[in-house]
Structures are given as structure tokens and as C-alpha cells.
């Protein structure tokens, strides 16, 4: 059995990188895959993000918008199974829970759910429990032999007291939940990005006081070496390995020199599965964990990539700023037959849909029938009027618009409903008085014989097509001429009705008036074309813009100071952290961050950009 934990730094981006969710999951060849920092809101969960053939998934999304942030954090656990509804596979959980306080699933009363609020959490305020679970940082799955915690630990800067308190409360409550389960003799796996590097060996630039941090002290107190109950599985298998990092700063190119930190962990606590009477020296790690390692092949920067300071800064590296960590287990027996918990993503309304009652289905069908009948037949109390809308052919003339004789056609074209409202009160009175059974024909003024469906498809396609530079300098006469023709059609149609009343045998010819707007349109197009021809060509303008941009780049390059370590042009940065220097520009060495002992790494050069005071 194989378990993988991976901070994906955005699940959408990783799916796009691999082509599909299924390809991403299959690349690990694992039975249980735990993702952190999915950056998905609950309403954004769709089948392409949550469902893959052969996998069952469980999500926890952030429910807060603290400091205006939405769609951050979030965790997801994917379990590879052959059958989701009746299986004895260990990978398929027998129960699942969102969060670790129990309050996120208080509305669920199914028999397959995890226990409600843990009995050891009564000392905490309910608002505190809801707050730590509100950011979507935990999914718990019970796999019978062990309980798996998929955790995304909070990050807290040294000067952010509010987040430090949140992080302390988060791990304090989480520890209580672990102790409660261990007291019930349950085995526990804790996997994920805990945002804690426990020892100086786990950090590239650890100083002398590195291990005195309160979170690192807490982490080490949980380990067996300090009298705790948890094994750091990676250190249990590789106790002396150095430079074994799982996360690298993405903005400094630190991956190139493996200048990072180990904050993605797999922890394990509990007894082994053996039934021997003498179990001294037995534990789950020594008896069932075969290997634990870092999947460095998932790193963004790989050997052979262009160096960042030699043109590589402009090349976007695909992948997360973390690397996955895996562990493989042996001698894990099957479990009794069971089905999938109700927390599975397949049952989410956004994916499965809302359950419909038989009455709602019949009501929708009845409403659809009524709408269809209304669109086919509509009657007026004053008389039966049928309005038909015809498109004029390419060579058609307005002479085709006429009033037929009395007809028994009572159908009302749905598309002409708007035209009824536009004819005005005068036309309505005329219809009431003179022709209660009259068919009025409105002719479109646009010379368009293309079917309406094809026209819509063409318009939809052109909406997303890229515009040329020329189109921004060219007037579009179609809108004005179309509106003129439309208004002229209505007035002419009314004129036809009036003329036919007084002279029923006469035909009104308006060819000259119809062709006049088209003639003006042609003149406008010709005039605009002449104006464009008089100016510089598009190719010449592009060349001028390119030369100007190259000149600006050269000026910027010349203004860059040289770093003292390599005598190379620096890169400009802007302070984004709130404070007195927010928005200020500075220069740093362009090379990737690395050990001070490596002369090829960043030399540490720093210089503020000069700010010239404005003359009043």
C-alpha cells in the first residue's frame, strides 16, 4: 500500500499541467493521495476537478473570506478503489469527516460517519472550534486499520501575532483530537504540509536559535525521541540525511541549488497489526513501513533547464513549489466489506445534483408543455392576429411586403412578440377596427438569407476571435445602418397597412429609399479605407513599436546596478509586504538563492532604488 502527500499549490494548475485529474493521480501510482492547498471554493468543485475513474475523493474547502481572501488553502484526499459501493479494500475509507473538531459534520447523522465532537474538546469555545475548521485545512478518513489526517498547517509570519495565535490554537486542538483517538487504541497517520521544519537539519539556512521556535519545540515534543507517541517516518528511515527538502521559495530560484526546507511530513503513531503475545519492540513503523522518501522528480526546476540569471527568469516553470512525499506499507490485511462514506465528492450537489421529487419532475414537465403551447398559439380578445417575420432575400425588394387577404391562421410566431409591442397603439386600433383576422408581415431590412441558427453560431465564434489592430481604427457602419433599416421597416410596414386600407390594389415601391442606406454604407467604407491607406501600414507600425520597446529595455538594462559578487546586472523587485517600505523598489543579485559557500549562488547584494524628491 502506498500513501502520497503533496502540496499542489493550486489543484487546477496541476490538472492543467498533467492534462487531466486522472493523469495527475495515476502519475503517483498510489492507493491514497492527499493534496493540500487546492485553492478551491466549495461552489467551484466540478466533476473534472473532483472525480476520476477508479478514485473516490473527499474535499474540505475554506468557508471564510478572512482579509478578503477566498479560495485559499483547502485539502483533498483521493482513494484508489476497484469498487466504491462494496469493497474490502483498505484504501476505501469506512468513514470520513471534514475538519477535526466534529462541528463541520454536525448535520450528518449517518451511521457511517465518524463520531461527533470529540469528548476532549469541551474545554474549547465553540467559536474557536469553528474558526480553526473554517479554513478547510483537514480531512479525516478512517481506513479501519488506521485513521488518516490530511493536514494543511497554517502559516504565521514572525510579526503577525494574530496568525501566530491562530496557529497555536490550531495545533493545540488538533493534538487533543489525536490524544483522544490514541486513548481509544486507534492507530493514526498524519500527512501533509504542516508548515513546520522541526530541526536545523530540515532547514537550509538554520541559525543558532532556529530550534527555539515554539512551533518547532511543540513538533519535537510529539515525537518518540522526546517522549511522544509519533514517529517522523522519513527520519525513522533516513535519520542522518541532510539537504532533504520538500519546499523551495518560488521567487528566488532556490530549487536550482536545493536551498529549501522540509515542512511536508508523514507522522505515524500506534501499535502494529501483529497478534503475537510478545510485542516488545513492535510498532507500526518498524513492522509495516517499508520506505518513506521525497519524490524529487516533481520539482519545478530540473537539471538541464536554462539558468535563471541567463535568460531563465522569463521561462515559466510548471509545477508546485513543493515536492511530494510518499510511504509504502506492507502486510496490511483486507477489511470487511463496506461502502463509501456519504462525504464522498460523488454525492456533492455540485457534482451529483440535487435530488428531485416525483412531484417536481411532473410540475416541470407540465410547465414546459404550457410554455410550448403558448409559443405555438396565442389569441387576442380583440381578434385573431398572426404576425410572421420573414427575412428579405439578397435580391428581394420591399415590394414583397403586402397584406394578404383574410386568413384563418391563428398561430403567433414567438420571435415576433417584440414586434407587436413596437407597432404602437395606432396600429393596434387600426387592426381592431378594420381587420380582426389579418396577417401582418414584417420584413427584415437586413440583406441576410443565412438561417438564424447559423448566424448565432457565427456571432458566438466571432465574439472570441482575436481582433486585428486595424479593426480599432475602422468604423463599423453595420450597427447604425441596421438600426436605420429596422426603424424604416417598421414605419414602412405601418405605411403599407395604411395605404392598403385606402388603396387595396396599389403596391408601394420603396426601392430607392431602401438602397440609400446601403449606398451611404459603401461610401463610408470607402472613405475609411482611404483614411487607413493614407497612414502607415500595420507592419511599419509594428516595427516602430518593437524598436521603441527594445530601446526601453536597453535603458532599463543600463540603469540596473551590478552586483558586487558577480559584476552582473541585478533584477528589480518591489516591496509587497505592508509597512513603511511598501511599494518601494530595490535591486538584488539576479542569481538563484543558494548556500553562501557556493560562489555560483546569489551573492546577497541588495540596494534600494534611489527615490528622487519632487521639486515643488
Image (spheres, rainbow, N blue to C red):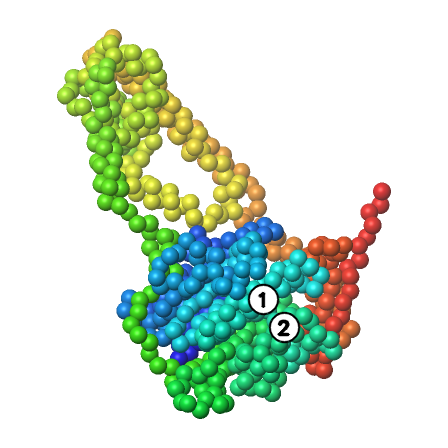
Return the residue found at the far left. Answer: 408
Q: Residue at x 25, y 36 (%)?
A: 367
Q: Is residue 531 above or below residue 513?
A: below
**Residue 161 disc label:** none
Image location of residue 59, percent across then percent down: 44, 61
Image location of residue 404, percent across then percent down: 19, 19
Q: Is residue 327 above or below residue 482?
A: below
Q: Residue at x 54, y 57 (%)?
A: 129
In the image, 356 versus 518, the foreground residue is 356
Q: Is residue 597 above or below residue 461?
A: below
* First reached walking from the N terminus: tag 1 or tag 2: 1
The answer to whether residue 460 is left or right of residue 295 is left
Q: Can you identify the residue that label 1 sits on?
A: 171
Crowding at mark 1 (Cα within 10 Å: few <14, some 14-19, many 20+): some
Q: Can you identify the residue that label 2 sits on?
A: 218
Q: Residue at x 58, y 78 (%)?
A: 228
Image location of residue 393, percent across then percent down: 27, 32
Q: Residue at x 56, y 53 (%)?
A: 127
Q: Quadrant of residue 186?
A: bottom left
In the image, 276 versus 570, the foreground residue is 276
Give the structural element (helix, strand or loop) at label 1. Answer: helix
Give the structural element (helix, strand or loop) at label 2. Answer: helix
Q: Marks 1 and 2, how far apart in space?
A: 9 Å
In the image, 44 versus 614, the foreground residue is 44
In the image, 287 versus 193, the foreground residue is 287
Q: Quadrant of residue 84?
A: bottom left
Q: Is residue 237 above or below residue 178?
A: below
Callout 1 touching callout 2 (CB < 8 Å):
yes
Amino acid at each position: 500500500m502506498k500513501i502520497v502527500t503533496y502540496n499542489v499549490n493550486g489543484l487546477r494548475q496541476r490538472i492543467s499541467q498533467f492534462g487531466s485529474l486522472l493523469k495527475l493521480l495515476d502519475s503517483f501510482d498510489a492507493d491514497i493521495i492527499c493534496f493540500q492547498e487546492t485553492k478551491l471554493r466549495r461552489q467551484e468543485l466540478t466533476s473534472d476537478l473532483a472525480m476520476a475513474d477508479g478514485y473516490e475523493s473527499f474535499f474540505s474547502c475554506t468557508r471564510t473570506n478572512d482579509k478578503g481572501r477566498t479560495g485559499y488553502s483547502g485539502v483533498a484526499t483521493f482513494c484508489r478503489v476497484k469498487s466504491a459501493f462494496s469493497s474490502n479494500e483498505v484504501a476505501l475509507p469506512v468513514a470520513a469527516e471534514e475538519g477535526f473538531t466534529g462541528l463541520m459534520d454536525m448535520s450528518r447523522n449517518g451511521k457511517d460517519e465518524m463520531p461527533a465532537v470529540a469528548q476532549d474538546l469541551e474545554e474549547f469555545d465553540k467559536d474557536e472550534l469553528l474558526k480553526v475548521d473554517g479554513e478547510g485545512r483537514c480531512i479525516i478518513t478512517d481506513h479501519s486499520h488506521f485513521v488518516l489526517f490530511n493536514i494543511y498547517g497554517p502559516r504565521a509570519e514572525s510579526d503577525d501575532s494574530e496568525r501566530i495565535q491562530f496557529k497555536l490554537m490550531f495545533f493545540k486542538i488538533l493534538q487533543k483530537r489525536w490524544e483522544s483517538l490514541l486513548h481509544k487504541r486507534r492507530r493514526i497517520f498524519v500527512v501533509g504540509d504542516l508548515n513546520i521544519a522541526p530541526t536545523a537539519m530540515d532547514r537550509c539556512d538554520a541559525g543558532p536559535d532556529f530550534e527555539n521556535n515554539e512551533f518547532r519545540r511543540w513538533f519535537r515534543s510529539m515525537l518518540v525521541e522526546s517522549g511522544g507517541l509519533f514517529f517522523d517516518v522519513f527520519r525513522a528511515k533516513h535519520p542522518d540525511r541532510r539537504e532533504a527538502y520538500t519546499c523551495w521559495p518560488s521567487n528566488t530560484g532556490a530549487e536550482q541549488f536545493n536551498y529549501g526546507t522540509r515542512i511536508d511530513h508523514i507522522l505515524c503513531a500506534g501499535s502494529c497489526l501483529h497478534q503475537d503475545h510478545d510485542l516488545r519492540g513492535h510498532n507500526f513503523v518498524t513492522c509495516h513501513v517499508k520506505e518513506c522518501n521525497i519524490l524529487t522528480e516533481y520539482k519545478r526546476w530540473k537539471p538541464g533547464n536554462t539558468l535563471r540569471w541567463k535568460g531563465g527568469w522569463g521561462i515559466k516553470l510548471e509545477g508546485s513549489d513543493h515536492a511530494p512525499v510518499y510511504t509504502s506499507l506492507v502486510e496490511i490485511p483486507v477489511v470487511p466489506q463496506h461502502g463509501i462514506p456519504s462525504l464522498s465528492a460523488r454525492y456533492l450537489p455540485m457534482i451529483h445534483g440535487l435530488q428531485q421529487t416525483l412531484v417536481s419532475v411532473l410540475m416541470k414537465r407540465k410547465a414546459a408543455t404550457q410554455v410550448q403551447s403558448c409559443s405555438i398559439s396565442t389569441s387576442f380578445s380583440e381578434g385573431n392576429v398572426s404576425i410572421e417575420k420573414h427575412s428579405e432575400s439578397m435580391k428581394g425588394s420591399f415590394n414583397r411586403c403586402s397584406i394578404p387577404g383574410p386568413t384563418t391562421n391563428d398561430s403567433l410566431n414567438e420571435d415576433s412578440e417584440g414586434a407587436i409591442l413596437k407597432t404602437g397603439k395606432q396600429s393596434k386600433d387600426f387592426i381592431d377596427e378594420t381587420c380582426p383576422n389579418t396577417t401582418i408581415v414584417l420584413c427584415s431590412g437586413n440583406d441576410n438569407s443565412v438561417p438564424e441558427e447559423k448566424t448565432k453560431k457565427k456571432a458566438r465564434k466571432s465574439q472570441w476571435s482575436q481582433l486585428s489592430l486595424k479593426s480599432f481604427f475602422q468604423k463599423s457602419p453595420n450597427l447604425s445602418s441596421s438600426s436605420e433599416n429596422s426603424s424604416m421597416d417598421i414605419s414602412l410596414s405601418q405605411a403599407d397597412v395604411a395605404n392598403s386600407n385606402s388603396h387595396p390594389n396599389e403596391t408601394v415601391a420603396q426601392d430607392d429609399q431602401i438602397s440609400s442606406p446601403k449606398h451611404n454604407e459603401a461610401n463610408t467604407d470607402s472613405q475609411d479605407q482611404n483614411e487607413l491607406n493614407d497612414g502607415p501600414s500595420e507592419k511599419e507600425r509594428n516595427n516602430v513599436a518593437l524598436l521603441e520597446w527594445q530601446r526601453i529595455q536597453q535603458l532599463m538594462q543600463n540603469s540596473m546596478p551590478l552586483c558586487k559578487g558577480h559584476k552582473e546586472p541585478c533584477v528589480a523587485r518591489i516591496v509587497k509586504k505592508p509597512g513603511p517600505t511598501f511599494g518601494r523598489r530595490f535591486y538584488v543579485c539576479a542569481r538563484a538563492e543558494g548556500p553562501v559557500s557556493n560562489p555560483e549562488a546569489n551573492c546577497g547584494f541588495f540596494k534600494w532604488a534611489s527615490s528622487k524628491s519632487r521639486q515643488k
